Amino acid sequence: MSGAAPKGAVPPPALRRTIGPVQLTFYALGSMLGSGVYGLIGQAAGVVGNAVWLAFLVALVAALLTALSYASLGSRYPHAGGAAYVVQRAFRTPGLSFVVGLAVACASLLSVATQSRVFAANLGELVGAPSQASLIAFGFILALTGVVLRGIREAVWVNVLCTLIEAGGLLLVIGFGARYWGAVDYLEVPPAAAGDPSLAILAMQGAVLTFFAYIGFEDSINVAEECRDPQRTIPLGLIGAMLLSALLYVAVAVTAVSVVPWRDLAQAPGPLTAVMARAAPWLPTVIFTGITLFAVANTALVNYVTASRLLYGMARQGLVSERLGAVHDTRRTPHVAIWVILLVLTPLSLLGGVAQLAAATVLLLLAVFAVVNGALIVLKLRSSEQPGRFEVSLLVPVAGALACSGLVIIRSATGDWTALALAAAILAGIIAAFLVLRPKGGGETAP
């Protein structure tokens, strides 16, 4: 339970503020670049053909609405706990805040577990030890835990290094494929769809897929208490990362369909690997495998940090055990939350089939985005709430809530029903956990 320390008592240590705008930009950018763009290019090309670049632009508009809401909320309330904090502040309903916070935490944990398996599979193939995948995954989780325990400064610098390598992989694709630009009609769509749905409709359908390449921007608000001047740092870092990722995605999309016909791109198991095989056949494939390892590690690292800060923030609000809000005296990290996450991740990283669960949490994340946009609407209309240094029009969260709700409906109606069923099961489990673990008088909201 958060509260004032007794008179004369030494206040508990706080998280260390070390993150500036540039570091936060890399932090959010690294999370987004590792969220599936390497595979999404092919899937989207199968829907919209050469106009895949347009799908990324349409998705940017939808994602940017929610990102602007997050930037405004981070400017108003720079607290760890992210979505759980602002939802509690707006709706003052501990149950909803608990569900929102734990849904994001589950998404982060399942992402880390999934990435650990991907990392293990790639490294196992690289070193000729595919049978040791489980051992490699466990070692990977331990290494992440060590970095996150060490401190936010160290975690962010590892993130910066990984992001530079990750972005470098995309720049390699652009650099070697740029000479092919202009070789195709960039508005060509699949023949079966030509003259039936309009290009705008196809772009919207493709945007449902490419939207997920932007997921990751929400991680930045969870390190608000570790940012220097967070009211300025969060908006600058978050919006900067969104725009940089969009530039990379559009350039990669144009390059990919210029080098490889969109039909082949849609069928390729590794679309960007296929692009490099044609644009730079002399380049050893091991280079791209190495870049993939850094991309996967970066996504896992950011999600590990996000999950630990969420639990820390929820503990400070009284939504979970106050022990999870403990901060290490010297490292200034939420060490208890980090150790608890390790205990959860260890069995998850050793299991197969985690990817299906991770896909289901995407639906939960979209629902969380809709609720967070709704929270900003409520807070902007409440006269007692002070505005932040970065304010947006009321139309932004309204449009963001509608866009995210629409994506949930489209994804549920057109995707595999298994993801929807798993998402409902995860949600039911979170609600059951709240009913069992509900702390007395929980749900405080710090001023």
Image (spheres, rainbow, N blue to C red):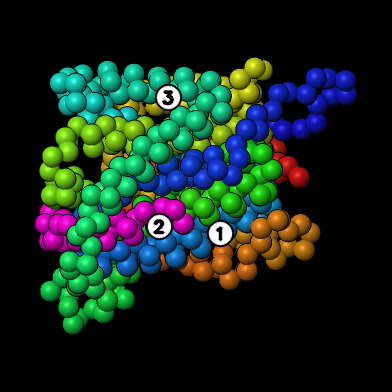
Residue that label 2 marks: 246
Q: Indicate the position of residue 74 as horizontal and vertical percent values.
A: 63, 49
Relative placement, left or right, of 383 versus 118 is right
Between the C-alphas of marks 2 and 1, the distance is: 15 Å
Which of the marked residues, 2 or 1, is nearer the chain's N terminus?
1
Question: Label 2: how many residues lie within 10 Å, few (<14), some (14-19) or many (20+)?
Answer: many
Relative placement, left or right, of 386 versus 259 is right
Q: Is residue 380 above or below residue 322?
A: below
Q: Indicate the position of residue 162 as horizontal and vertical percent values.
A: 40, 34
Q: Is residue 249 above or below residue 427?
A: below
Residue 68, numbered label: 1
Q: Is residue 184 above or below residue 260?
A: below
What is the secondary structure assignment of the residue under circle 3?
helix
What is the secondary structure assignment of the residue under circle 2?
helix
Residue 172's image quarter? top left
Residue at 78 percent across and 24 percent down: it is 11
Residue at 18 percent across and 68 percent down: it is 184
Q: Is residue 80 visible?
A: no
Say which amino acid is labelled 1: Leu
Q: Is residue 293 visible?
A: yes
Q: Nearer the viewer, residue 5 or 179?
A: 179
Question: Label 1: how many residues lie within 10 Å, few (<14), some (14-19) or many (20+)?
Answer: many
Q: Which residues are magenta?
A: 243-267
Relative placement, left or right, of 265 versus 10 is left
Say which amino acid is labelled 2: Ala
Residue that label 3 marks: 144
Say which amino acid is labelled 3: Leu
